[in-house]
Image (cartoon, coloured by chain):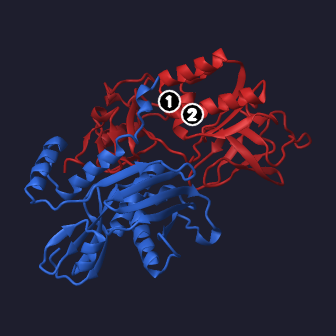
Chain colours: A red, B blue
Amino acid sequence: MAASAPRLAEKRVGQVVMPGDVLLLPAQPDADGERLRLAPVGPQKGRLVCGPGLRRGPEGLLVTKCGLLRYRGPAGQAGGGTGSGSGGTYWVDSQQKRYVPVKGDHVIGIVTAKAGDIFKLDVGGSEQASLSYLAFEGATKRNRPNVQVGDLIYGQFIVANKDMEPEMVCIDSSGRANGMGIIGQDGFLIKVSLGLIRKLLAPGCEIIQDLGQLYPFELVLGMNGRIWVKAKTIQQTLIVANILEACEHMTAEQRKQAVAKLSES
Amino acid sequence: MSLPEEEAGPRVPSAERLRRTRIRKRQGEPRGWRARMEREQKRFESGELPALRRIVCEQGLLSRPDGSASWMQGDTSVLVGVYGPTEVKVSKEIYDKATFEVMLKPKIGLPGVYERSREQMIKKTCEAAVLGTLHPRSSITIVLQVVTDGGSLLSTSLNATCVGLMDAGLPLNSLFSGVTCALDADGNLTLDPTAKQEKEARAVLTFAIDSTEKKVLMSSTKGTCSVEE
């Protein structure tokens, strides 16, 4: 069948893929696997990573989500589908609303319960995440962080897999807060789609740059689709929040016009 | 914008794409979709190919569910909302895969035995298509609302469910589609029958077919027929 005939993965980069499609890899995966096992542990040159929306099948990569197929070269540069023989990352860029916890993601959680020495956080996934009271900067058994039910917390997943309860921390590996922790009392939290968050977090995002020209404001972006905004006045906060919500379906042109109109008034 | 293609998103051409997949599913001729569509058109005009009613589809029209779609096949229209993966009741929890809950709401009144049996059929089809093992101990809830029923309701619900699952971004093995066909007293086959044709038919058969191997995921028969199809 033409619909399900396997095609070379590099030919499909930038195109729409559908669940059930099979993508062939240029290098023989078996031979590759053999070499990986013999070689010392660590990231290697010829290693191919299969990202979200793709699964390893017997014939090649099996697509499990609809969206655009993307590829990034092994050295981190965006290769437009050329020279993918030596490894790199393939993934499917899809629109989604529901968050599934991923290890290392920075998210905004809402405290729902305090149970002994852990807090329960709603992160928008299928299960509540747990956060130890010791996982804050400068926290000791004596010096507990002041966390109340309903507070917003910006943290990072250290345990996130399908079989276990996700676990978060608010410190990095050297014990520093590094921007994480409890988010202040005022400000405004909005929920957007995961695609928009990824767009906003992309390096050199124009939306943030455009908005930054209006007036100063604070912004926290969680990979789980939550955005916290705070500007000098409530009115300014709401303006930023509304633009961020609306810009998902706006073109760059429309957004520039909207921002220009605001900066005049 | 560093990723300009993202503006278009995957959902824009989906209705057209799905229509194509459906056509492809009916007639498994390879070699390029354009040639196939032209061939299809010729056969359609000559009356060789049974006519389908017009298909209209809209994705992501509801704001609250994680995935939503409205699917219309002629006068039959179904609205679907997909929630998941979400938290699940301990009593319904399955430790190695996702729990599916399907609710089919009729146009008027409360769901009865008929709806319950349809729910089970859709549920089993979804379980076959969705990679439930990737989200163990969670629930995937599918709510279907019948807007209008003009025949071929089960196949319309199946198609709506598939588009809803796609919109929710759940991991799928393959896509699936539903086809209803009616056999009349003379043995003539009508695809996608209307309510009137269904009533006059000797037998009404509904199949769910997956997009990769073109295998039957679910079948339902009403009336009598031989092993002819």
Q: Which amino acid is tagged 2? A: Ala
- Residue, far left: B46
Say if residue A205 shows up in the picture: no
* Residue drawn at 38 percent across, 68 percent down: B149
Q: Secondary structure at mark 2?
A: helix
Given residues A12 and B114, the one toward you in this image is B114
Q: Are marks 1 and 2 in contact (CB under 8 Å)?
A: yes
Left-right relation of A26 to A139: left
The numbered disc on residue A250 is: 1
Chain assignment, label 2: A
In which quadrant will I find the C terminus of chain A?
top right
Q: What is the quadrant of residue A54 in the picture?
A: top left
Q: Tell me which residue sits at (17%, 55%) in the image.
A: B28
Which residue ends up furthest to the bottom in the rendered image? Answer: B224
Height in image: B41 above or below B209?
above
What is the x, y in percent for residue A118? 79, 50
Q: Chain of mark 1?
A: A
- For mark 1, give the secondary structure: loop
Mark 2 sits on what residue? A246
Which residue sits furthest right? A142
Left/right of residue B228 with respect to residue A53 in the rendered view:
left
Mark 1 vs mark 2, CA separation in Å: 7 Å
Residue B124: image location, x then y, percent: 41, 69
For badge 1, the amino acid type reads: Met
> Can residue A244 be seen in this snapshot?
yes
